[in-house]
Image: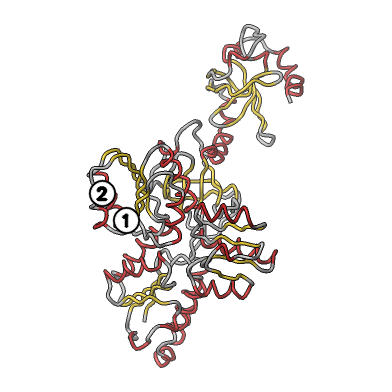
Amino acid sequence: MKIYLAKYYGFCSGVRLAVKKANDFLEKHKEAEIVGDLVHNKTVIDEFNRLGLKQIDDYKKIFSNNIIIRAHGETVENTKFLEENHKNICDTTCIKVKKIHELVEKYSNIGYNIIIAGDKEHPEVKAIVSHSKSKAIVLKDFDEAKDIIGLKHLAVFAQSTFIYDKFDQMSKYIKEHNEDVLVFNTICNATENRQNAVRELANKVDVVLVFGSNFSSNTKKLYEISKNINPKTYLLENIHELDMSLIKPDYKIGITAGASAPDDIIKEAIKVMENLNHEETMKKEDAKETKKDEMIKAIDDSFKRISRGEIIEGEVLYVTDNDVSVNINFRSDGIIKKEDLAEEDVNPKDLYKQGDKIKVYVVKIDDGEGNVVLSTKKLKEMEVWDKIEEVKDRNEIVSVKVKSLTKGGLIVSYEGIQGFIPASLVSVRYKENLEEFVGQTLDVVIIDVDINKRRLVFQEKLLKNKNLTRREKKLGKILKKAK
């Protein structure tokens, strides 16, 4: 028997962060109440019940001051009620879902009617609908999408766990048969990755085991995708639910899991499957133990370890006007904020597209919302500093952009690196008012570099052939006054 793990499976960054937030909250307050499930996984729910989290079915029945909002998010009305009536609130809403809320609010506020591909009874979708200031229509499949004809000003979104192929088909149809249609692929990249991975897995194995809750939207969709490809697909809460008579010793077994399924469930499944046929295991004891150990290790190592200050390679997952999301093969996705891009004053969409391979610098492992903070700006700065000494030695003329006026001179930017031009070295002719230079691009040469102190000083290019000995003697005093 051979076991194959899907390339992407199990806990996503949103669920992982929700679990961490809830756990920290319960450690502090000892008990709390929640409407619905924190995440759709019985093992996780049972553990939180043990820790003091009580589930109820209506926010108006909450008596505790300690409230946890589930990862799927909550409606605007319920959130307002909680904020007005309860003291301690832990909001574990997935950051990807919050982004959908923001987009729906934005486009409904400017007159677009909202279309959502998803399950109208799912708590995530109910929350999304509540953020629309205009009419919101929820469509579950292509048949329902075909009724959307001849309308204007539509903004189309997807439940974060919706099947990508279905959303693509539905959104294309709506765009073709209506006027002024904006389409936003708001399917979580982790969801899309898991769906693509299970397609690949289902095609190469005899049996697929999908671990997760029957109530989990993303898990059921993994099951649906796999079942359409491989009829021998089984949806399980844990390995003990599997009828072992369905498994033959020579089968290739594929394993995947929904976003809310803990790693321990997968580890347990592998151990059980490896020991199914005890007689066969005894015959090949060494080989089997090696395979089992390697598979367990594969789970632990399936996401690489990264450190602050490390330079790594990633793949662009999606791009917005304000940031770039990057798959870095870590338990959380990476995010590059607009201000951390190497290029200044540029829309991220003009720089990157989904699938681009990029090198990034790791600024912080967790930004408080489960994302790894990345920067291409920092990476470029490192590359620029490496060549600055050489540029100075060659007395090379370079261009800088004047960013602001400061005491004693101008603050400038050279390929993303901040530098300084003393007032006396800005122009051949003395300029009393330097404000006219702000926003301009100047041709300059480097006259002083200190890489350790990250100090970079320039002068106007025409001054480089003048006799500046007296001025250069005063440079230290000028810099000191400018600080």
Q: x%, y% of residue 50?
A: 61, 76
- The residue indicated by pointer 2 is 148
Quick one: SS at disc 2? loop
Residue projecting furthest to the bottom:
279
Foreground of the two, 300 or 142: 142
User: Is 479 on the left or on the right of 139, as rendered?
Assistant: right
Q: Looking at the rendering, which quadrant does residue 388 occupy?
A: top right
- How far is disc 2 from disc 1 in space, using C-alphas? 10 Å
Foreground of the two, 206 or 2: 206
Check if mark 2's residue and mark 1's residue have beta carbons within 8 Å.
yes
Going by the numbered disc 1, the residue's amino acid type is Leu
Q: x%, y% of residue 211?
A: 42, 73
Q: How is the image coloured?
A: secondary structure
User: Is 480 on the left or on the right of 65, as rendered?
Assistant: right
58 vs 414: above or below: below
Going by the numbered disc 2, the residue's amino acid type is Ile
Q: Residue at x 57, y 11 (%)?
A: 462
User: Is 216 on the left or on the right of 225, as rendered?
Assistant: right
Q: Which numbered marker is on residue 33?
A: none
- The residue indicated by pointer 1 is 139
Q: x%, y% of residue 431?
A: 64, 9
User: Is 408 on the left or on the right of 7, as rendered?
Assistant: right
449 vs 333: above or below: above
Marks 2 and 1, the one that precedes in the sequence: 1
Q: x%, y% of residue 27?
A: 68, 66
